[in-house]
Image (tube, rainbow, N blue to C red):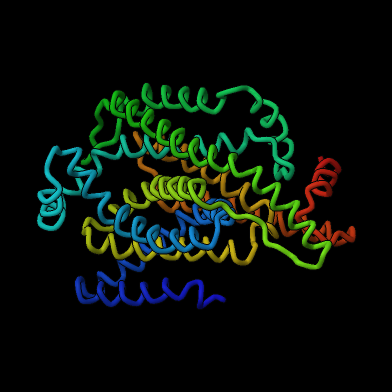
């Protein structure tokens, strides 16, 4: 199971490290290895959230996510995206931007650094919306009940997430953006750029997330009919599998996953410049890390990890909320990537341990279903 799921990641790792040695010697080897580890540590919460969405999709779209999705993640976001940033921010053609990345690496790094405020605003607001919509939803299973119960009640207010995101964006544009960090340690007023980029991130979330949610809701009736048919089939001794997202619903969920992955990759791409400004080594290292994130997503789905450890998804979304705030703060201040990675690891680790304790408590009570929401609510009520 492990080799089947991570086989391609192992193969890509070997090829990337060999290519790094030929391209940059043993120094290149070390840089690629460090970048791969950086990408994995920063994107573990991405894998957990992706798994929660991917498990709803059928086998065909899961395969698309692992093939076309990998190409978009590895080559699109880790290789093409930094070039596009330079081309747009410097008003130059893509070929000229590629030539700049290969021949004048210092100037290339400077342009990417100067474009960071707009990138951080787009990604920060997009991720913030994911976090807000999660915590404002009334869920059967609650991790931090003392916090999630009142937030779920507040979530009944229409468009509350959008209002909060716009307020946060306005504050960021008036504070952090007024003294945005630029190349060489200087600061510049990027309020207008941050405001426009943040609005673009919000609009992107509402369009892609809204469409995926719309088509997902449209097939709920089909799922209910399928469940009824499954119950009838089980009574007659002919078990059936539940419907998985397909067609337009799965397509827009796939788009949502790709935009989500892009938002997560922003901090990795920007952080990579603290290690190297060589776009080839950057693509090899970050691309290798992205492969492991994809494989880990599939592993979580196939192992049913999110069903067994029910608080993992909560921890991942709290990590997303923390990452969104960090991205907005980095508009003005530099934050070490180690801190960013540790925040996510700590929150997910905490949620995992909480899940383990919960499963043990339920097992001691004689429950055979560790994901029973009714028992979870009763247990949560008893603990609060």
Q: Residue at x 34, y 56 (%)?
A: 72
Seen in the image, is 141 located left or right of residue 210?
right
Q: As drawn, which residue projects farthest toward the right?
A: 365
108 up-or-down from 156: above or below = below
Q: Residue at x 37, y 36 (%)?
A: 122
Quadrant for the C terminus, please: top right
- Residue 117: percent from left, percent from top: 31, 35
Of residue 140 and residue 82, the one placed in the foreground of this image is 140
Q: Please indicate, yes or no, whether residue 345 appears anywhere in the rendered image.
A: no
- Residue 188: percent from left, percent from top: 24, 29
136 up-or-down from 12: above or below = above
- Residue 41: percent from left, percent from top: 46, 58
Seen in the image, is 267 located left or right of residue 282?
right
- Residue 367: percent from left, percent from top: 86, 59
Total marks in image: 0
Residue 124 position by quadrant: top left
Of residue 13 and residue 256, the one placed in the foreground of this image is 256
Quadrant for the N terminus, please: bottom right
Residue 236 position by quadrant: bottom right
Of residue 117 and residue 203, the one placed in the foreground of this image is 203
Seen in the image, is 244 located left or right of residue 342?
right
Q: Please indicate, yes or no, whether residue 133 appears anywhere in the rendered image.
A: yes
């Amino acid at each position: 199971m492990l080799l089947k799921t991570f086989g391609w990641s192992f193969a890509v790792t070997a090829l990337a490290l060999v290519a790094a040695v030929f391209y940059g010697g043993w120094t290149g080897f070390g840089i690629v290895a460090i970048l791969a580890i950086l990408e994995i540590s920063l994107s573990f919460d991405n894998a957990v959230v992706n798994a929660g969405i991917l498990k709803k999709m059928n086998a065909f779209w899961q395969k698309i996510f692992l093939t076309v999705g990998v190409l978009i993640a590895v080559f699109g976001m880790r290789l093409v995206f930094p070039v596009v940033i330079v081309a747009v921010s410097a008003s130059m053609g893509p070929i000229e931007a590629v030539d700049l990345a290969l021949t004048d690496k210092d100037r290339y790094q400077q342009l990417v650094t100067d474009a960071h405020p707009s990138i951080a605003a787009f990604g920060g607001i997009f991720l913030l919306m994911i976090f807000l919509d999660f915590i404002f939803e009334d869920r059967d299973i609650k991790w931090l009940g003392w916090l999630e119960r009142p937030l779920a009640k507040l979530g009944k207010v229409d468009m509350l997430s959008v209002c909060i995101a716009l307020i946060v964006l306005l504050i960021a544009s008036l504070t952090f953006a007024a003294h945005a960090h630029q190349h060489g340690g200087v600061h510049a007023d990027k309020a207008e750029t941050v405001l426009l980029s943040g609005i673009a991130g919000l609009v992107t979330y509402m369009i892609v997330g809204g469409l995926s949610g719309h088509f997902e809701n449209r097939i709920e009736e089909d799922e209910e009919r399928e469940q009824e048919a499954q119950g009838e089939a089980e009574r007659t001794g002919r078990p059936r599998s539940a419907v998985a997202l397909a067609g337009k619903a799965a397509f827009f969920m796939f788009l949502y996953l790709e935009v989500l992955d892009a938002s997560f990759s922003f901090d990795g791409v920007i952080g990579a410049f603290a290690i190297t400004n060589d776009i080839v080594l950057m693509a090899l290292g970050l691309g290798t890390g992205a492969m492991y994130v994809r494989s880990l997503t599939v592993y979580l789905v196939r192992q049913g990890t999110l069903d067994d450890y029910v608080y993992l998804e909560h921890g991942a979304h709290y990590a997303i909320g923390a990452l969104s705030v960090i991205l907005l703060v980095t508009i003005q201040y530099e934050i070490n990537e180690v801190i960013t990675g540790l925040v996510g690891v700590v929150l997910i680790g905490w949620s995992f341990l909480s899940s383990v304790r919960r499963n043990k408590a339920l097992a001691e009570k004689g429950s055979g279903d560790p994901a029973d929401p009714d028992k979870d609510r009763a247990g949560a009520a008893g603990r609060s």
